[in-house]
């Protein structure tokens, strides 16, 4: 029996592993992501306590932090595979689970099982959208200009526009029983946009280079926008949501235009190569 359970004898040649310290620039973006995740989970708690205004604000702030953490990681050169995976998991909670449960607690529960199914559809649509986004990051054949566009509505935009009925409710628009089916149809439409292949402008390439004469106007626009959001938060969010939805066709049209330009350039290059090829 002694052979079955030999005593543990550590190898004298084994050296204790020493882990190198992690630079703070690698930790800072993940801390921002974790703060956003805490806000998303807190929004769920606030919704089930019936405190919808702070719940919606928590999701909006989480969306702002989601737009910051990636840029901070790139600026500090602190991108990592761990950070990318953490960001995706946080996005699913913040923009999939939290808005779905807020909407269900707000009005979809009036439709009982049907309302819960719609909440599930919204959350799962966000999950599928994030999985597709991560898979497309590894595509080496994707043209550089396509990085200016998302495939489908991005998760933060889907969450912010999906909560449009809540903004309207805070502004005094009362949804009686007739309004619940309308909200249900609206949430389903947003979920379909999230998992669709409709190209939407990403804006990720903005801010790399700013013309000198636009610096002061940009500062003024940011200050005015911040003042509007602080003074009239739900009016501003309702306006932003409606403007974003109205701008989706223009982004898709611009994408198709650039796609046609790329196809024409490829045909021209192919015709030039055939003319330059030596004849037998």
Image: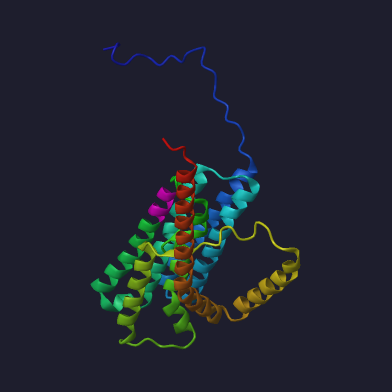
Q: In the rendering, at what x and y percent does residue 27 appear?
A: 59, 46
Report the side of 185 relative to 38 (left or right).
Answer: left
Q: Residue at x 54, y 43 (%)?
A: 80
Q: In the rendering, at what x and y percent does residue 23 appear?
A: 63, 40
Where does the magenta region start and end?
A: 130-136
Q: How many marks?
A: 0
Classify 191 as above or below 132: below
Who is closer to the viewer here, 57 or 82? 82
Q: Main secondary structure of the magenta part?
A: helix
Q: Quadrant of the N terminus?
A: top left
Report the side of 29 relative to 190 (left or right).
Answer: right
Q: In the rendering, at what x and y percent does residue 244 appear?
A: 49, 73
Question: Which residue in the rendered view is the most extreme toward the front?
Answer: 280
Q: In the rendering, at what x and y percent does residue 196 appear?
A: 36, 63
Report the side of 266 relative to 77 (left or right).
Answer: left
228 in the magenta segment: no
Report the side of 161 relative to 224 (left or right).
Answer: left
Q: Residue at x 47, y 65 (%)?
A: 257
Who is closer to the viewer here, 203 or 165? 203
Who is closer to the viewer here, 210 or 24? 210
Residue 109 visible within the image = yes
Who is closer to the viewer here, 280 or 220? 280
Residue 42 visible within the image = no
Classify 262 as above or below 168: above
Q: Residue at x 52, y 12 (%)?
A: 13
Q: Quadrant of residue 192?
A: bottom left
The colour scheme used here is rainbow
Q: Quadrant of the C terminus?
A: top left
């Amino acid at each position: 029996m002694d052979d079955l359970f030999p005593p543990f004898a550590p190898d004298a040649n084994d050296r204790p592993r020493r882990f190198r310290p992690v630079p703070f620039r690698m930790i800072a973006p993940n801390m921002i992501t974790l703060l956003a995740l805490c806000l998303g989970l807190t929004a769920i708690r606030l919704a089930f306590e019936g405190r919808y205004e702070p719940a919606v604000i928590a999701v909006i702030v989480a969306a702002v932090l989601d737009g910051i953490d990636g840029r901070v990681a790139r600026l500090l050169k602190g991108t990592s595979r761990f950070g990318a995976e953490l960001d995706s998991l946080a996005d699913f909670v913040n923009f999939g689970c939290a808005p779905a449960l807020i909407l269900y607690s707000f009005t979809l529960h009036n439709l009982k099982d049907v309302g819960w199914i719609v909440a599930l559809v919204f959350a799962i649509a966000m999950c599928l959208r994030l999985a597709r986004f991560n898979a497309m990051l590894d595509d080496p054949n994707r043209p550089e200009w396509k990085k200016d566009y998302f495939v489908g509505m991005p998760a933060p935009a889907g969450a912010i526009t999906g909560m449009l009925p809540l903004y309207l409710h805070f502004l005094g628009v009362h949804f009686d029983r007739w309004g619940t089916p309308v909200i249900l149809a609206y949430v389903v439409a947003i979920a379909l946009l999230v998992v669709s292949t409709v190209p939407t402008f990403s804006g990720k390439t903005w801010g790399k280079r700013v013309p000198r004469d636009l610096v002061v106007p940009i500062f003024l626009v940011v200050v005015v926008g911040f003042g509007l959001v602080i003074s009239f938060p739900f009016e501003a969010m309702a306006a932003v949501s409606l403007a974003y939805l109205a701008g989706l066709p223009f982004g898709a049209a611009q994408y198709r235009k650039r796609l046609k330009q790329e196809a024409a350039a490829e045909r021209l290059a192919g015709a030039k190569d055939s003319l330059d090829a030596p004849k037998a």
